[in-house]
């Protein structure tokens, strides 16, 4: 049986190889401000980052508006090593619903979530190609509830398809998730109690 890959170790090795005086560019898909807080604190020391907020899965629209404003506020208040830019993707929930059609009854953490990962990461890879950034990745792996192996598998597939390097990640490592909770408290960030889609909201209410 093959050893499980350590994506954090791979990221550390990649960062160590960045030539002195060189600042690569990164397109970072963000699922929300709290999850992005640690990732931005960590990666802005090494990359010039464009945060891409594309989350058509979020329900209801008022929740989306609240989350995107928190993302903007956080970026405005951070003291990054290198510049952080912001791009908001289109909010068309029908893109999410058509992507997960037929998977509505699958529990959280399964194939429906994987399809949602790919929807958002594909948009990030496409924008990274359009902008000409050196890398793309997502904040999703910071959550203890998200499958980092699947996220990186999708990222590598999209790298081959779009020709933009995927930055390996498992941001929950090195106490990343714990640090995101600390930063959320420090910046007074709104922390939602469900992933974002109507299915995760219903599952939360049942529990």
Image: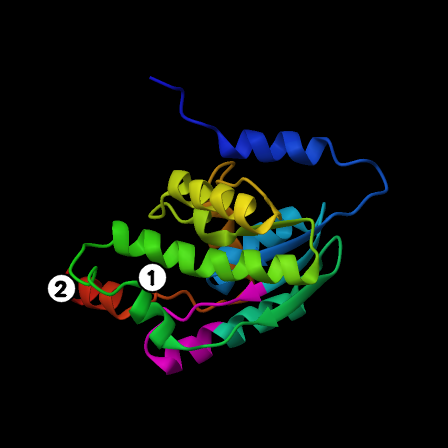
What is the x, y in percent for residue 91? 45, 77
Q: Nearer the viewer, residue 192 or 13?
A: 13
Closer to the camera in the image, 1 or 40: 1
Residue farthest front in this picture: 161
* Direction from residue 22 to residue 14 in the image, left or right: left
Q: For the residues marked 1 and 2, what is the alpha-carbon distance in whole angstroms?
A: 14 Å
Lower sequence index among marks 1 and 2: 1
User: Could you tell me if residue 171 is visible in this image?
Assistant: no
Magenta stretch containing residue 207, yes or no? Answer: no
The span picked out in magenta is: 52-67
Residue 3 in the image: above or below residue 190: above
Q: Is mark 1 on a helix, strand or loop?
A: loop
Mark carried by residue 203: none
Decide if residue 148 is in sight here: yes
Q: Are marks 1 and 2 in contact (CB under 8 Å)?
A: no
- Is residue 62 shown in magenta? yes
Image point (59%, 35%), residue name: 11
Look at 54% across and 43% down and name the residue there: 160
Helix, strand or loop for disc 2: helix
Residue 174 coordinates in the image, percent (x, y): 52, 36
The residue singled out by tag 2 in the image is 206
The extreme top residue here reads 1
Which quadrant is home to the C terminus? Answer: bottom left
Residue 132 position, x and y percent, is: 70, 57
Q: Which quadrant would the N terminus be assigned to in this image?
A: top left
The relative height of residue 45 versus residue 128 in the rendered view (above or below) is above
Q: Would you name the residue on which mark 1 appears?
A: 195
């Amino acid at each position: 049986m093959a050893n499980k890959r350590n994506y954090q170790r791979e990221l550390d090795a990649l960062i160590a190889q960045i030539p002195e005086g060189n600042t690569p560019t990164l397109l970072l898909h963000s699922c929300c401000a709290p999850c992005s807080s640690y990732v931005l604190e960590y990666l802005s020391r090494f990359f010039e980052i464009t945060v891409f907020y594309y989350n058509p899965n979020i329900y209801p629209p008022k929740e989306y508006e609240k989350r995107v404003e928190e993302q903007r506020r956080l970026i405005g208040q951070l003291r990054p090593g290198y510049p952080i830019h912001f791009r908001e993707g289109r909010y068309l929930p029908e893109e999410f619903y058509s992507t997960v059609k037929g998977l509505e009854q699958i529990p959280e953490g399964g194939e429906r979530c994987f399809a949602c990962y790919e929807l958002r990461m594909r948009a990030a890879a496409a924008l990274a190609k359009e902008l000409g950034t050196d890398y793309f990745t997502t904040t999703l792996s910071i959550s203890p509830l998200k499958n980092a192996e699947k996220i990186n598998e999708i990222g590598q597939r999209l790298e081959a398809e779009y020709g933009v390097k995927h930055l390996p990640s498992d941001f929950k490592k090195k106490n990343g998730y714990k640090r995101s909770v600390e930063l959320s408290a420090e910046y007074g960030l709104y922390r939602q109690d469900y992933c974002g889609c109507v299915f995760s909201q219903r599952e939360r209410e049942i529990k």
